[in-house]
Every structure is written in C-alpha cells, then in structure tokens.
Amino acid sequence: MAEPTRGLLDTSVVIDHGILDPASLPDESAISAVTLAELAAGTHAATDEQERARRQDRLQWAAATWDPLPFDTECARKYGLIFAAIRASGRSSRPRFADLLIASMAAANGLPLYTRSLSDFVAMEKLVKIVEI
C-alpha cells in the first residue's frame, strides 16, 4: 500500500476546494495561518454583500476544518532562502509576500505545496516541492 500523500494547501486551493477533484489533493492536508489571514482580508475586500457572505463562509469553513500551521523560527529561516531565490531570479518579492510566507511554511514543515497558481511560485522549486492542481 502506498504511503499517504501529505501537503500544505495554498490559499487558491482552499478557495476552490469544493470544485477540485479530490484525487488531485493530498490524503492529509494542512493550511497555514497566512492562508487564514488572506481569507479574512478577502472577506473585508469584497464590495458585494453576497460575495462577502460567500467569502466569510469559506473563512469559517477553513478555520473549522484545519488547525493552521503557525509561522515560526524555522519558517523565518526558510523565508530568507526563498526570498533570496526570488531576488536572484530577477522577480519582485513584494507582490508575492503572502506566497513566499506560505512557501516557507511548506519548506519548514517538509511538505509539498499544492497550488492553483503555479506562476506565483516560480524560482523557488529547488527549496519547496510545488504541486499544481
């Protein structure tokens, strides 16, 4: 029997979780505290009442489904390496701040990162395994 797959879900995967093929997801998944922060910000950013309610529902579902991984000292170390890799590639790190934090959390916890936005994670593939869904 194969080992169960494990992985950290990017915010894009959490947002689209209900429409994704379950076979494309890891058997055991985690999310980061940064993902909860992005979901909370997204709720406040919505200008349409129905969209705000939908986003609030997604935030509450995610918070009830997972105990998010915290950003700790090892994540901070990995963030520095990922930041350096992004800069060395000539890409700007500023618009990808949350993505870099999430990737550093995957790297620090030895988990592949599952994402719907592969282009957000270009130049860090040597530091964290990226799985596109």
Image: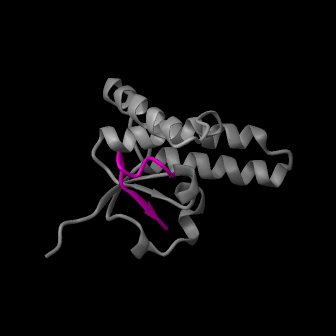
Given residues 129 and 54, the one toward you in this image is 129
Which residue does the image show at 43% across and 37% down from the upper left? 82
Residue 71 in view, yes or no? no
Q: Relative to 71, does residue 47 appear above or below in the rendering? A: below
Residue 115 location (% of width, % of height):
50, 58
Q: Give yes or no for residue 61 being in the magenta stretch.
A: no
Asked if the stretch drawn in magenta spans residue 124, the answer is yes
Which corner quadrant holds the N terminus?
A: bottom left
Say whether residue 130 is left or right of residue 97.
left
At a point 41% along the width and 67% down the height, the residue shown is 25
Q: Is residue 10 left or right of residue 52?
A: left
- What stretch of residues is rendered in magenta? 122-133
Which residue is farthest top?
73
Image quadrant in which you'd find residue 76: top left
Going 53% across and 59% down the picture, which residue do you hit? Answer: 118
Please identify the dominant SS of the magenta region: loop
Q: Position of residue 116 (x, y in %)?
A: 55, 61
Q: Is residue 133 above or below residue 37?
A: below
